[in-house]
Structures are given as C-alpha cells and as structure tokens.
Image (spheres, rainbow, N blue to C red):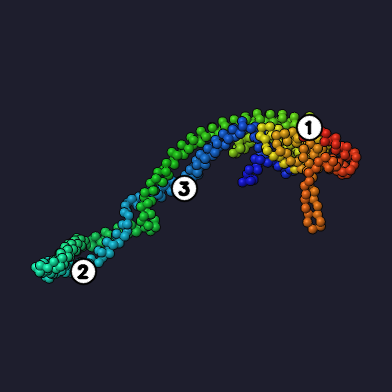
C-alpha cells in the first residue's frame, strides 16, 4: 500500500532513473504526464475502446478457431439428449423398477403368503378366521352389560375394522399378482436395462435427467454459433472503427503536447548550459497496445547542424542528467509531484552547468519539496537546508550520522567540496560567492 501511494507522492531520480529515461515507455509516460487532462482523457477513452474491441475479438476468435470442436460437441450432445428423451426416465424410477422386478420374480411365493394371510384374517370358505373370532368376542362382551367390558368391546370393534382393511389390501395385492405374468417381468427387465444404460453413462439417473433439462440450452447456444459469428464480426467492425477514431484522437493530443514539450524542454536546456541543444519529442506510428498506437521518442541535437538522435544514443551522462532535470521542471507545471529525490543528478557535469542545475532545482523547489544528494558545491549552494551525511567506523561497527550545516559550517563544507580543504581562504571565498547566487528567500 505504501509503495502504491508513494508512486504518486515521491519521484526518485538517480543514475538508474536516468537510464530509465532512455526507454520508449518512460518517454511516453513523460509526454502523457505533460499532456495533462487533455491527453489523460484521450488515453482513458482509447483504453475503454481497446478493451471493448479486444473482448469482442477474443470471443470471435474463440468461436472461429473452435468451430469444429463446438460442432462436434453439438452433435454428441444432440445424440445424448435423443437417447435420454427416448428412455424418458422418471426420478427414482430405477429403484421402483428394481422393487417391481423383485416382486414379479417371486410372484408364486408372494401369492401363497398373501393368500394364507388373507384366509386367516377373513376366510371366504367359512373357516374360522380372525374377523369371526373378534366379532364373537365383541358380542359376548356386549351381552355382559358391564361398562368396562363394553369399553373393551369397542376396542375389539376397532380391531375388526382394521383386520377388514388388511384383508382388503391383501385381496388387492393378490389381484395385482393375478394380472401379472411372465410378459410383464420381461417388460420390466427391459425397462431396467434401458435405465441402467443411462446410469452407466451419466453416473446416476438424476444426472441424466439434469442433463436433459440443461443440455437443451447448451445445444441451442452451440447451434447458434453461425449467427453469433456474424453478429460478433459486425460488433468487432464497429468496435474497431471506434478504436481507430479514439486512437487518432489520442495521437493528435500527444502530437500537440509533444510540440509544446519540445519547445519548453529546449528552453530549459538552454538555461542548463546547453545553449545550442534542441530536444524534439517525436510521435510516430507504433505497435498497438493498451497505451495507444504511438511510439514516443526523445531526440536530442546537442548543437546546430547535428542530426537529432535518441537520447539513449545521442546524450552523454551529464547531458542526460540535464535533459531529465529539464523534463521534470517542465512537467511539474502541469503534473506536479509533491516530493522529488535526486541522487547525484549532477553526475558528469561541473562548472557553469552545475550552477544552472542548482538554479533549476531551486525553481523546481518553488512548487515541490526537493531533496538532492550531491557532491558539487555549485548545486548545494542553492539549497535552503544543507545536511552533511558522514560515515564513521571504530573498526567493528560502521555508523552514519546526519548533521545540519549552517553559517560557517556550511561555508567550510562547501569549501571542502570545492577544493578538498575546508580551511582554504580561496575556497571559502568561492563558497561565499556561490551562496550569494541563491534566489532571494532561499
């Protein structure tokens, strides 16, 4: 989280950051920062159109490249659904068929058991049975006229009704068995085989039924591939036309910003002891990406008549430091960064150029906090706070200390940076002269 926030709060520039300025992506980002809201809005619109086009193109490519596979899937699914529809299974049918087959296979044993039970409950031949015995017992208790026995007689009456119901159920069971025959058992077994084949293929009867319910929509989707391809092709053409328009708008915004950035940075380079240098920000056609179709190049012509060359090849270390500083000073006017950290941005330069670097850092400090690590007194002279970082070692542990320099201490340190001697009268005089170059109020 801190790293994400710091990216927008602090810009760190060191030798590695100067090397980063040589990359095309870093130069494009610098131009976009300078372009401000105009370029930012055009870039956002382009990215929205780019993602919309890429989504449609991806879907269309998938349908097109997988057309044969999807057609084969549709054929297989169509055949599978036809097989399930032909069987037309019902939920739980496999268990019901197994129970029915078991009953039919043991029909004779079941008939004998049911007939014996029904005869015992209610005999059709007049033999003693449960029903007659219960009825006779109930009548005997009722004739006794005792209240307790009458209550028991009522319970016997209830048992008689229940026995009669059971006898009816057994009669129905026997009637069902009488209506069946070997042909029904064969039909049940045939049905069981058909259902079992679905279970083997799909894992369970419920899975087969579920596929019958959901497979139709999938089949409709697959069968619609031809029409979908036509619709997506039309959508892609529309998305491409929109993308082309937004890419052109982005290129136009960048081109306009590039002209202004070229002029502003060139002016800054003149102030940084590069009076004859010209920086040109070129916007040309590049590979299409989420960042647009533009390739941005920073071209430096160090003196009149020189052919502009990419800063990666046409700038020395010192020149690259000043180009980077000039760009930051210019961009700070449209896209300020709260804090800049410059680590030896003055590497490879000295003399008048170093003084101008100090001036530009001071100018940048008017709108941002600027922290500069330097070994040049010409740069340090323009700071309003001078800190000395010193390492010390006792042979075992190395420590670093930071000390605020002011007044005579600051003059002595600057003299040391100038000549290597902090007590040199000439160096001290030079140090005082440099401090007088600071703008009023610094």
Which residue has dot 2 on it?
A: 113
Choose top left, top right, bottom left or bottom right for residue 408.
top right
Which residue has dot 3 on it?
A: 69
Helix, strand or loop at mark 3: helix
Report the Cα–Cα distance between label 1 and label 2.
119 Å
Write the residue at 77% across / 34% down.
Answer: 442
Of the residues tagged 1 and 2, which is closer to the observer?
1
Q: Which of 352 and 89 is in front in this view?
A: 352
Q: Position of residue 14 (x, y in %)?
A: 73, 43
Q: Where is residue 135 in the image (x, y as percent from the top left)?
A: 12, 67
Query: Are the residues flagged by discs 1 and 2 in contact, CB closer than 8 Å?
Result: no
Query: Most extreme residue toward the left, as rendered?
Result: 143
Q: Which of marks 3 and 1 is nearer the N terminus?
A: 3
Report the Cα–Cα distance between label 2 and label 3.
60 Å
Q: Where is residue 63 in the image (x, y as percent from the top left)?
A: 48, 43
Looking at the image, can residue 369 be seen? yes
How crowded pointer 2 is (Cα within 10 Å; few <14, some 14-19, many 20+) is rated as few
Q: Which of marks 1 and 2 is nearer the N terminus?
A: 2
Of the residues tagged 2 and 3, which is closer to the observer?
2
Dot label at residue 439: 1
Helix, strand or loop at mark 1: loop
Looking at the image, can residue 327 be seen? no
């Amino acid at each position: 989280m801190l790293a994400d926030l710091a990216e927008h709060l602090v810009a760190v520039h060191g030798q590695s950051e100067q090397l980063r300025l040589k990359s095309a992506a870093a130069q494009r980002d610098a131009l976009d920062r300078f372009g401000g809201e105009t370029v930012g809005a055009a870039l956002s619109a382009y990215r929205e159109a780019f993602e919309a086009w890429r989504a449609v193109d991806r879907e269309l490519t998938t349908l097109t490249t997988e057309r044969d596979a999807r057609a084969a899937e549709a054929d297989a699914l169509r055949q599978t659904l036809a097989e399930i529809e032909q069987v037309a299974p019902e939920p739980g049918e496999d268990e019901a068929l197994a129970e029915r087959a078991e009953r039919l296979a043991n029909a004779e044993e079941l008939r004998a058991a049911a007939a014996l039970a029904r005869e015992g409950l209610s005999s059709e031949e007049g033999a003693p049975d449960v029903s007659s015995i219960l009825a006779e017992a109930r009548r005997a208790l009722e004739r006794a006229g005792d209240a307790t026995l009458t209550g028991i007689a009522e319970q016997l009456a209830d048992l008689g009704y229940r026995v009669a119901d059971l006898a009816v159920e057994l009669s129905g069971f026997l009637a069902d068995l009488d209506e069946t025959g070997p042909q029904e058992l064969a039909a049940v077994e045939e049905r069981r085989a058909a259902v079992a084949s679905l279970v083997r293929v799909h894992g369970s009867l419920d899975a087969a039924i579920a596929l019958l319910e959901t497979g139709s929509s999938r089949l409709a989707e697959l069968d619609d591939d031809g029409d979908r391809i036509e619709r997506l092709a039309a959508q892609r053409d529309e998305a491409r036309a929109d993308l082309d328009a937004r890419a052109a708008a982005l290129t136009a915004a960048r081109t306009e910003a590039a002209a202004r950035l070229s002029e502003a940075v060139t002016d800054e380079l003149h102030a940084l002891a590069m009076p004859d240098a010209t920086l040109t920000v070129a916007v040309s056609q590049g590979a299409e990406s989420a960042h647009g179709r533009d390739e941005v190049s920073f071209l430096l012509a160090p003196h009149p008549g020189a052919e502009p060359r990419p800063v990666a090849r046409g700038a020395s270390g010192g020149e690259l430091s000043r180009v980077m500083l000039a760009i930051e000073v210019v961009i700070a006017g449209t896209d300020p960064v709260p804090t800049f950290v410059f680590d030896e941005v003055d590497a490879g330069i000295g003399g008048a150029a170093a003084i101008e670097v100090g001036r530009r850092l001071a100018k940048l400090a008017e709108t941002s906090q600027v922290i500069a690590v330097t070994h040049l007194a010409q740069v340090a002279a323009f700071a309003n706070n001078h800190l000395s970082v010193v390492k010390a070692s006792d042979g075992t542990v190395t420590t670093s200390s930071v000390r605020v320099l002011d007044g005579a201490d600051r003059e002595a340190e600057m003299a040391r940076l100038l000549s290597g001697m902090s007590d040199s009268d000439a160096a001290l005089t030079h140090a005082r002269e440099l401090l007088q170059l600071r703008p009023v109020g610094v």
